[in-house]
Image: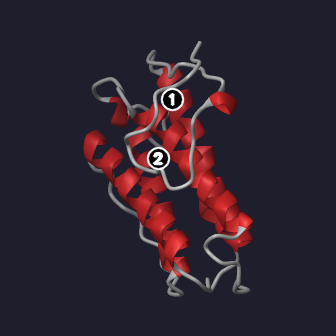
């Protein structure tokens, strides 16, 4: 893997951090106000449950941090109760964002970080949103182009939606 010399304030790094803020915004909508028992909901026998998917997303961000630290490691977590797993999602996302912001020279390219853990997390947030609809608890649609999403805002406290429908 090629190292990247892009500084924490470089446009490519800021775009990656904006992507993480987008994950926090969209992911927050997907996990917030889930119905009781949602963590066990699955689309079909043999597929991952919502809780397993959310735990996997936390694992992806832990993996991304290990990549930035130059000691790539994967760990598959046992899902926690929904509220705890939701907190872990934001904690792991924040740790990844902080690592991107504070590490001057990355031992892995931004492209690898995007094509691996970030793209996978985007897919899985969509899966949780789909499972919400299948569980008769859909996430409200929104014009995400109008959402107030800012690099560095990766916690559970997001700006309220501007235009849901």
Image point (56%, 22%), residue name: 162
Q: CA distance from mark 2 to mark 1?
A: 10 Å
Viewer-proximal residue among 123 and 89: 89
Question: Considering only vertical position in the picture, is 45 above or below 20?
Answer: above
The residue indicated by pointer 1 is: 131
Q: Earlier in the sequence, mark 2 or mark 1?
A: 2
- For residue 34, the mark is none
Q: The residue tagged with tag 1: helix, strand or loop?
A: helix
Q: The residue tagged with tag 2: helix, strand or loop?
A: helix
Q: Residue furthest front?
A: 9
Residue 106 found in image quarter:
bottom right
Q: In the image, 12: left or right of 129? A: right
Point out the image quarter for the N terminus.
bottom right
The answer to whether the residue labelled 2 contacts the one labelled 1, judged by CB atoms less than 8 Å apart, is yes
Residue 77 found in image quarter:
bottom left
Image point (56%, 28%), residue name: 130
**Mark count:** 2
Viewer-proximal residue among 159 and 142: 159
Q: x%, y% of residue 161?
A: 52, 25
Q: In the image, 69: left or right of 15? A: left
The residue indicated by pointer 2 is: 53
Image point (59%, 12%), residue name: 165
Instruction: Describe the colour scheme in one phrase.
Output: secondary structure
Q: x%, y% of residue 125?
A: 55, 41
Q: In the image, 69: left or right of 9? A: left
Question: Considering only vertical position in the picture, is 65 above or below 158?
Answer: below
Q: x%, y% of residue 62?
A: 44, 68
Q: Residues within 10 Å of mark 2 (few under 14, many from 20)?
A: many
Residue 47 visible in this rendered orientation of the protein: no
Q: Residue furthest top?
A: 165
Question: Considering only vertical position in the picture, is 21 above or below 108?
Answer: above
Q: Residues within 10 Å of mark 1 (few under 14, many from 20)?
A: many
């Amino acid at each position: 893997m090629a190292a990247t010399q892009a500084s924490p304030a470089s446009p490519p790094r800021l775009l990656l951090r904006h992507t993480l803020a987008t994950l926090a915004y969209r992911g927050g909508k997907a996990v917030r106000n889930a119905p009781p028992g949602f963590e066990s909901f699955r689309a079909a026998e043999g597929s991952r449950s919502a809780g397993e998917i959310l735990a996997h997303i936390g694992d992806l961000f832990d993996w991304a941090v290990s990549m930035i630290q130059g000691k790539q490691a994967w760990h598959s977590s046992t899902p926690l109760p929904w509220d705890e797993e939701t907190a872990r999602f934001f904690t792991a996302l924040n740790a990844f964002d902080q690592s991107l912001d504070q590490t001057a020279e990355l031992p892995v390219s931004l492209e690898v970080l995007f094509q691996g853990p970030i793209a996978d997390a985007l897919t899985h947030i969509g899966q949780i949103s789909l499972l919400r609809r299948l569980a008769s608890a859909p996430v409200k649609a929104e014009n995400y182009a109008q959402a107030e999403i800012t690099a560095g805002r990766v916690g559970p406290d997001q700006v309220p939606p501007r235009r849901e429908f």
